[in-house]
Image: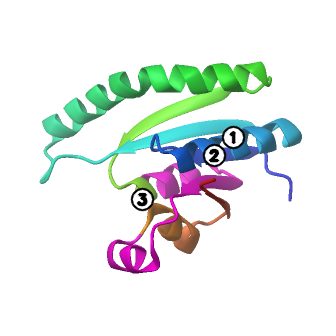
Amino acid sequence: MIPKRILVGHDGSKGADDAFESALDLAALCSARLQWVRSQRPPEPPTRVETEATLEAATQQYGEMFEGLRRRATERGIDLESRVLVGHAAEQILRLAADTKADLIVVGHRGRSAIREWLFGSTSRRVVSYAACSVLVVRQT
């Protein structure tokens, strides 16, 4: 299957940058649409007002980073869409992938130790476990 809609989760880490580069390569190769998503955890317990404030602050905070990513995509002839969402990263990636009918989700993996990952879990592991589409996990180089 050749993906036509690729969703890439990005948290600002080196692993996320590696995943973004892989997603760019695939989007260029397949002439696919590319959507970038960043999730921001809400305050605990979240209220509607606090969630909206978190979303607005995160959108402003990540705007500069996204513009750099958009320039990289534009240089390769790829139109990049962006979304900043509030909630747990894996849950938001999975929800957006379902809503946009993504064919492929690309996420990075930081390479945590097995014990730490078992205790705390990881976004990439959760996305792989529950995604309704294919998932590419890019290990940090």
At horizontal 68% and vertical 37% (from top left) the residue drawn is 34
- Measuring from the top left, give residue 95's x and y in whole percent: 48, 54
Whether residues under marks 1 and 2 lie with C-beta atoms below 8 angstroms apart, the answer is yes
Residue 107 lies in the magenta stretch: yes
Residue placed most toward the observer, 50 or 137: 137
Label 3: few (<14), some (14–19) or many (≥20) C-alpha neighbours in 10 Å = some
Residue placed most toward the observer, 101 or 21: 21
Whether residues under marks 3 and 2 lie with C-beta atoms below 8 angstroms apart, the answer is no
Residue placed most toward the observer, 53 or 48: 53
Residue bearing mark 2: 18
| Residue 136 horizontal side relative to residue 25, left or right | left
Residue bearing mark 3: 91
Q: Earlier in the sequence, mark 3 or mark 2?
A: 2
- Measuring from the top left, give residue 111's x and y in whole percent: 52, 64
As measured in the structure, the alpha-carbon distance from the residue carrying label 3 to the one carrying label 2 is: 21 Å
Tag 3: amino acid: Glu
Residue 50 lies in the magenta stretch: no
Q: Quadrant of residue 20?
A: top right
- Measuring from the top left, give residue 55's x and y in whole percent: 30, 33
| Residue 5 horizontal side relative to residue 11, left or right | right
- Frontmost of labels 3 and 2 is 2
Label 2: few (<14), some (14–19) or many (≥20) C-alpha neighbours in 10 Å = many
* Element assignment for label 3: helix
At horizontal 86% and vertical 59% (from top left) the residue drawn is 1
* Element assignment for label 2: helix
